[in-house]
Image (cartoon, rainbow, N blue to C red):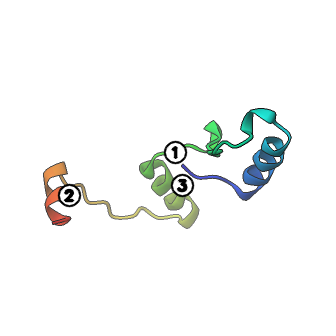
Amino acid sequence: VFVDEDDVGTYTIKAVDDPRTLNKTLYIRPPENVMSQMELVKKWEKLIGKQLEKISISEEEFLASKK
């Protein structure tokens, strides 16, 4: 989840004035800002004008690399 600084400010101000948020933890996750890692990579590729090399690994390979 990626959150724009402007969104954080907007939601924080709204939360301050909302009695439902009193003594609560506020998670700021606007639905417009949710994107997958692959979507983020595609955006970067478009911005830089070239395709990045991607390597896929299995779940088992990933977990084995964390030991």
Name of the residue lying farthest toward the top? 20
- The single residue placed furthest to the right in the displayed view is 17
Image coordinates of residue 3 in percent, x first then y, are 64, 52
Q: Nearer the viewer, mark 2 or mark 1?
A: 2
Q: Which residue is mark 1?
A: 35
Gap between marks 3 and 1 measured at Cα: 10 Å
- Helix, strand or loop for disc 3: helix
| Horizontal side of residue 14 vs 24, given as left or right | right
Q: Amino acid at mark 2?
A: Phe
Left or right of 5, for residue 49: left
In-image side of 11 versus 28 (left or right): right
User: Which residue carries the number 3 mark?
Assistant: 43
Q: Nearer the viewer, residue 57 or 29?
A: 29
| Helix, strand or loop at mark 1 | loop
Q: Does the residue at mark 2 contact the one at mark 3 (Cβ under 8 Å)?
A: no
Q: Earlier in the sequence, mark 2 or mark 3?
A: 3
Front-most of 29 and 42? 29
Of 64 and 43, nearer the camera is 64
- The alpha-carbon separation of the residues under discs 2 and 3 comes to 24 Å
Residue type, numbered disc 3: Lys
Which quadrant of the rendered structure holds the C terminus?
bottom left
Mark 1 residue crowding within 10 angstroms, few (<14) / some (14–19) / many (20+): few
- From the top left corner, tell me how far across and down residue 66 is, in percent: 20, 65
What amino acid is labelled 1 in the image?
Met
The tag on residue 62 is 2
The residue that appears at 54% across and 55% down in the rendered structure is 43
Residue 54: assigned label: none
